[in-house]
Amino acid sequence: MRNRLILALDSFVTEPKLSPTEWDFRSLIHNKPTVLQRQELHAAIRYEYARESDAICKLGEEFAELSDDQVEQRGTLMFPKPGGLQLFTVCPFWNCIFWPKFFPRVAWLRIPQEERTRRVEDYVAAEPPRSLKINEVDHFAEWELPPKTGRIRIGNVENLIVSIDWSMANDSEIVRAFGQWVRKSRPGDIPEPRGDASRQNVEAAYLTRLGVMRLLHYYPFWSAREHALDWELKIPPRQSNALRMRQEVRKDLRGMFGADLLKLAGKFLIPPEELPRSWYTITEQQRGLRGRYPRTA
């Protein structure tokens, strides 16, 4: 009887296997990254975080239903279909996420490198970043323009109408005045990004937190930690710190896609109550919490 009980317990705690491509993102981190490697890291973060959102995955299904003619009918920025697609395409690297051949089933690291590179290059060629660029957009849609009084943001992007009297100030004075405006006007919910020297470390932290959350979704904490250490990856020595990283993932996901800003027909791009798909730990699932509570906060 004792042996049968031990066998039963062993079968209950049998741990599912999680592919390293779901949580070991070290191959995307480089000491001296090229421009393309930095862009791939940026795209991979958004791709993997998007895989954790039910709302974005649903938009991916809507995109997959569009014909080539529908996609090309109005260019690469807007899609002729109601819903959140039009809003989502203002996000960086949207084309690396709306990728029916892979998203959301296939982890970024399981996509062949040549296809990843080509996709990122296509984004850069078709839609270079608009931040810090002046006089490069001749025509704005009406909804992109700021009102007569006030400001308008589209995700993390703000379009400005600037009036400069060139005859009244030299270049240094204009630059100084604009610098003062920037420091005074930065939105409170968008902290200043770090410089290039440390930006990659910050972005790598996004993937570290995501990896920890996914490990806890499949393994008990101590098994997850041992599993990560076997792969020479750091994981918090305390379970409370690991669970705090899970909270960060949820916050990062919402901020990354402007979830609280992008709103259409009274609905947010990502509902405020939505949790990442890998939110519940294996312990919570075994206790039946998954079936007892909905996917809400």
Image (tube, rainbow, N blue to C red):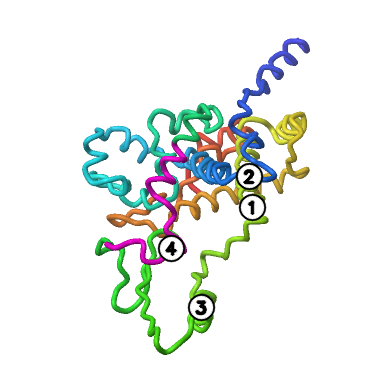
Identify the residue position indicated by label 2 in the image. Answer: 33
Q: How far apart are labels 3 and 1 at the CA level?
A: 29 Å
| Tag 4: amino acid | Lys
Identify the residue position indicated by label 3 in the image. Answer: 175
Q: Which picture quadrant has residue 239?
A: top right
Identify the residue position indicated by label 4 in the image. Answer: 133
Q: Residue drawn 34% across and 35% down? A: 61
| Tag 1: amino acid | Val
Q: Which mark is drawn over residue 221?
A: none
Q: Front-most of 241 and 156? A: 156
| Residue 38: image location, x then y, percent | 57, 46
Q: Of the residues under marks 3 and 1, which one precedes in the sequence?
A: 3
Q: How far apart are labels 2 and 4 at the CA level?
A: 24 Å
Identify the residue position indicated by label 1 in the image. Answer: 202
| Residue 287: image location, x then y, percent | 61, 33
Q: Does residue 74 belong to the magenta stretch?
A: no
Q: Quadrant of the N terminus?
A: top right
Decide: few, some or many residues near mark 3? Use Cα within 10 Å; few <14, some 14-19, many ≥20.
few
Secondary structure of the residue carrying numbered label 1:
helix
Decide: few, some or many residues near mark 2? Use Cα within 10 Å; few <14, some 14-19, many ≥20.
few
Secondary structure of the residue carrying numbered label 2:
loop
- Most common secondary structure along the magenta stretch: loop
Q: Front-most of 220 and 253? A: 253
| Residue 288: image location, x then y, percent | 56, 33
| Residue 145: image location, x then y, percent | 30, 67
Q: Of the residues under marks 2 and 1, which one precedes in the sequence?
A: 2
Tell us which disc is closer to us: 3 or 1: 3
**Badge 4 vs badge 1, beta-carbon distance below 8 Å:** no
Q: Of the residues under marks 4 and 3, which one precedes in the sequence?
A: 4
Q: Residue drawn 47% across and 30% down? A: 115
Tell us which disc is closer to us: 2 or 1: 2
